[in-house]
């Protein structure tokens, strides 16, 4: 069911939000803010500013509600969990559009070059879900290493075969775990893994962390090639861009120890879906877990759905009720600042009035934000 809820504006100003339909859960739980029914809790705020507020889940095809209302919208809100793909073609058909906000983290569903050329501002709620995702990564690592999913499916189907499960179950202790990307999420994953007495914690990124940060996290810097070669578990925590698209492919996977594991909660397209499925089928990968897909919602015939030893879920790692409160508040703050002409928080800006923000350039990433009090400390539920 497509949810379309709107208010009337007397001055022609429009905000369009593309959110997933929550159905009965959204009606039961008002804190499910990312659902179309609850509209990020922004309706009173936006109405107070004189905006018409349209909320829909319909985003596919030329006749979608996204395309219909984007034509005269000033602000577009979307989430990574049900992304509105803001392509160059759509931007060209949206002459009034000024601001695109990601309620969450990750704006790869926006054509940033086209957005910059059109003079748009693109922003996201940086740091709003880092704790949520980091916890999810650790959970998925344990799911794979302990062979949890097959064990659970065995008992729910009426079976009881301890040997069949224990044959592929291990301890995380004394294993080598590495993160591809060691920003806010990657660092928190490494921090949370310290208590498991892993043999070594490794990371690979475009630049090395300060020595004091490495010491605090107890991590060692390696190349991407070494990371995949020596790790028992690799977790992907880097952004999707032209250099990371399809980065984890057959060539890289085949350098891993046979039976190693990959966890990806970053972006599905970083991992080549066919190569991952083939590696799971052959046993080169002992397991693959994640909640991100190359297209979302994932097609019913997506090769990861039926691949052996997968622990895939819908994209929800960064959208716990706690995270939703944080990114709903952050979205409100971004819009409030924008419409009143105040500067946005530097860390939230991806494109600033037609110019790619410096911190989005990989040559100027700010590592000074490590372990500072972020959104997880500011907003309590």
Image (cartoon, rainbow, N blue to C red):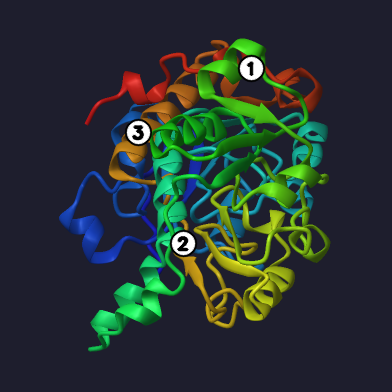
Q: Residue furthest bottom?
A: 158
Q: Secondary structure at mark 1?
A: helix
* Residue 128 appears left or right of 29: right
Q: Position of residue 1 (x, y in %)?
A: 37, 72
Q: Which mark is residue 367?
A: 1
Q: Could you classify mark 2 by the number of other residues whose Cα lies within 10 Å: few (under 14), some (14-19), or many (20 or more)?
A: many
Element at label 2: helix
Q: Position of residue 220 (x, y in %)?
A: 66, 28
Which of these two is toward me, 121 or 188? 188
Residue 63 seen anywhere in this rendered image of the structure: no
Residue 226 placement (x, y as % from top left): 77, 43
Q: Nearer the viewer, mark 2 or mark 3?
A: 2
Measured as percent of width and height from the top left, residue 292 is found at 55, 57
List the residue tagged with mark 2. 144
Of tags 2 and 1, the one toward the viewer is: 2
Nearest the viewer among 270 and 282 is 282
Q: Residue at x 23, y 60 (%)?
A: 25
Of pointers 2 and 1, the one earlier in the residue sequence:
2
């Amino acid at each position: 069911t497509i949810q379309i809820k709107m208010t009337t504006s007397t001055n022609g100003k429009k905000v369009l939000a593309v959110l997933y339909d929550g159905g009965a859960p959204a009606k039961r739980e008002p804190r499910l803010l990312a659902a179309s029914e609850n509209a990020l809790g922004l309706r009173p705020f936006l109405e107070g500013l004189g905006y018409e507020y349209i909320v829909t889940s319909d985003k596919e095809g030329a006749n979608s509600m996204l395309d219909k209302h984007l034509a005269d919208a000033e602000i577009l809100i979307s989430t990574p969990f049900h992304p509105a793909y803001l392509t160059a073609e759509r931007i060209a058909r949206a002459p009034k559009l000024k601001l695109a906000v990601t309620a969450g983290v990750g704006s790869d569903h926006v054509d940033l070059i086209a957005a910059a050329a059109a003079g748009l501002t693109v922003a996201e709620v940086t740091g709003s879900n880092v704790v949520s995702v980091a916890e999810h990564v650790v959970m998925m690592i344990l799911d794979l290493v302990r062979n949890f999913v097959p064990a659970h499916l065995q008992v729910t189907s009426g079976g009881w075969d301890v040997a069949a499960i224990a044959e592929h179950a291990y301890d995380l202790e004394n294993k080598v775990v590495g993160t591809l990307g060691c920003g806010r999420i990657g660092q928190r994953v490494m921090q949370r893994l310290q208590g498991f007495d892993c043999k070594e914690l490794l990371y690979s990124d475009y630049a090395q962390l300060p020595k004091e940060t490495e010491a605090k996290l107890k991590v060692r810097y390696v190349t991407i090639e070494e990371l995949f070669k020596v790790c028992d578990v690799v977790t992907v925590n880097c952004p999707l861009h032209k250099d990371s698209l399809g980065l984890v492919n057959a060539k890289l996977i085949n350098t891993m120890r046979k039976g190693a594991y990959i966890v990806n909660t970053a972006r599905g397209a970083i991992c080549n879906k066919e190569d991952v499925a083939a590696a799971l089928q052959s046993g080169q990968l002992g397991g693959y877990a994640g909640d991100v897909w190359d297209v979302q919602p994932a097609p019913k015939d997506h090769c990861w759905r039926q691949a052996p030893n997968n622990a895939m879920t819908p994209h929800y790692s960064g959208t716990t009720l706690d995270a939703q409160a944080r990114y709903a508040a952050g979205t409100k703050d971004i819009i409030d600042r924008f419409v009143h002409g105040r500067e946005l928080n530097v860390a939230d800006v991806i494109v600033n009035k037609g110019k790619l923000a410096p911190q989005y350039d990989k040559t100027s990433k700010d590592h000074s934000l490590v372990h500072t009090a972020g959104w997880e400390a500011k907003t309590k539920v």
